[in-house]
Image (tube, grey):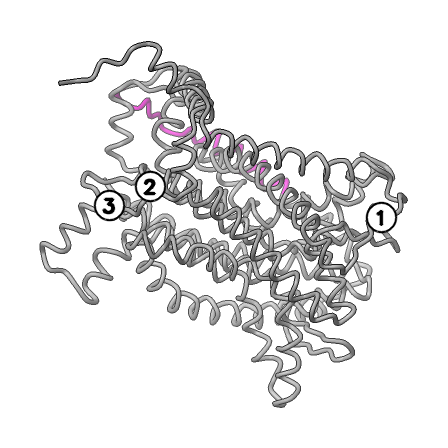
Amino acid sequence: MPTTLFPSMAASRRLPNAWDLLAILCVFAALIGIGHVAQGTLVSVSTPGAVDVSLDPWRLPEYAVRTTLRMFAALLASLLFTFTYGTAAAKSRRAGLVLIPILDVLQSVPILGFLTFTVVFFMGLFPGRVIGLELAAIFAIFTSQAWNMAFSLYQSLKTVPADLTEASNAFHLSPWQRFWKLEVPFAAPGLVWNTMMSMSGGWFFVVASEAVSVGDNTWKLPGIGSYVAVALEQRDIAAVLWAIVAMLVVILAYDQLLFRPLVAWSAKFRFETTAGAIASDPWMLRLIRRTRLLSLAGEAISDAAGIITGLRLFGGGSARGGYRAPSRVVDAIWLAVLAVIVLYACWRLSSFAVGALNLGEIEHVVTLGLITMMRVIVLMALATIIWVPIGVWLGLRPEWARRAQPVAQFLAAFPANLLFPPAVLGIVHFHLNPNIWLTPLMILGTQWYILFNVVAGAAAFPGDLQEAAKNFRIGGLLWWRKVIIPGIFAYYVTGAITASGGCWNAAIVAEVASWGDTRLQATGLGAYIADATDKGDMAKVVLGVVVMSAFVVLFNRLLWRPMYSFAQRRLTLA
């Protein structure tokens, strides 16, 4: 017999409880910490202590909060960039002709190259203020996060199953409704995993981003990255270890408080008709559900989001999809405009470098690019062989994926320059060849793009297809060739694109490693750019970056883009 629920009893269920008190305390503590840190961004650069970094371990909690806030500010900017840039590239064929090659170039440009041009801009917006340095650091972190997330959304939007698109057309959804009701939910699992990878990528470059230079002036913003940089300069191993512990605590905290609930939430968007393997809800998600005030706030936000995403903006839907053949005249005009822009850019670059460079120098740089390319190919092959099986195993077992999640985030976030000292000492002690043994340093921070994307692809693999494979007793190599590799292929290509671009980028710091007075250098394009940067030879820096960008674009055009097209044509679930 059902129990009668009187209005007074219903109202009591909405009253705050002990869980609400705990949640409110946590929220207010976070707001107080943010406010305290924000005060330091409004002062002058010359204020005592504004840009000073102490190796006192008791300052690490404050530094950890400041670094984490910079990374989350950059992450919000990356999400905004992803939903605008990635969507435009996927939705507009003509825009994609421009935006995707630009994205290829952007991910190959070294983070120090962005800092060179953006620091002056932000310092000009806020002359003499710490906030100018903060914005420059946030932008540098943004450049290490955004490209991976944009590629992930682009891949998902290009591989939406055709039957789901036809269903949205049958329901006459407008483009706005289709984007939020179909395409974003379909992209959510992969985007969540790539967001985690982007956070880890931000940690990887945080050392460079928190040291801001303008001319002869260098400022180190208080944070874990600058703490590590000072510790390495002073050869303080104890301080380095303290920084690693602080970084581990921060990664575990936001993994438990944010990313575990997000992964559990995104699991409901898997494309399947039968329930696949699921893990129990994380404790943070259960805590939020037990609160009453937070539940009310969540319901209000959900209702508001439902109203906004349900608006019939940008025209009504059509049962036929409204397909129109592209205009060849418009295509010809568009390609002509792009050709003019490319020729103008080439002319400007050549006029900049013609006085300081000659044909022999260009041939030398191209040869160095081929050497670095061989390193990238070998490292990508090794990373694929190692991490694809591991990623598939974890992705098909949500409980194990949840256990490995913080470990993978920590390893992906671990700054590679902390491993340079032991690498240099080992190469010198055993008289090893730097051209071979400095090479693994290039893949340390980028191999995780492959792992995270493969885990996302395997986690999103439909449970009914897994059951069908079991029923037909498909196993061994046949299962890999016919079942799982086609299912994760688009995700793997996304990870491989960002991993290979990051590998090129990392060559600048990996092909030159030093510890104290000992300096090792491998032959390659990265070492050429690093050496030219140290000497202040801008013509050679520009030449090296242009050649590197050209290699990345050609690599993507000739290898990864055809793979993307193949996945879109033949391996889309429908």
Relative placement, left or right, of 309 versus 361 is left
Q: Tag on residue 267?
A: 2
> Which residue range is magenta in the image?
319-341
Q: Secondary structure at mark 3?
A: loop
In the rendered image, is residue 157 in sight? no
Could you tell me how far apart the alpha carbons at marks 1 and 3 are, in whole angstroms? 55 Å
Q: Tell me the quarter of the picture where residue 310 sits.
A: top left
Q: Nearer the viewer, residue 99 or 398?
A: 398
The 10 Å Cα crowd at callout 2, few under 14, some 14 to 19, many 20 or more, is some
Q: Nearer the viewer, residue 429 or 251?
A: 251
Whichever of callouts 3 and 2 sits on the residue coming sooner in the sequence is 2
> Was residue 451 drawn as part of the magenta stretch in this picture?
no
Q: Residues within 10 Å of mark 3 (few under 14, many from 20)?
A: many
Measured from the top left, where is residue 243 in percent x and y?
A: 65, 60
For marks 1 and 2 on the same chain, the one whose residue lies earlier in the sequence: 1
From the image, state whether disc 1 or disc 2 is nearer to you: 1
Q: Is residue 434 above or below residue 241?
A: below
Q: Which mark is residue 462?
A: 3
Measured in 3D between alpha carbons, the distance from the residue under mark 1 to the one under mark 2, in whole angstroms, is: 46 Å
Q: Amino acid at mark 1?
A: Gly
**Label 3 amino acid?**
Pro
Location of mark 1 (residue):
49
273 relative to 447, above or below = above
**Residue 101's spot in the image, x, y percent?**
54, 47
The quadrant of the rendering that contains the N terminus is top left
Foreground label between 3 and 2: 2
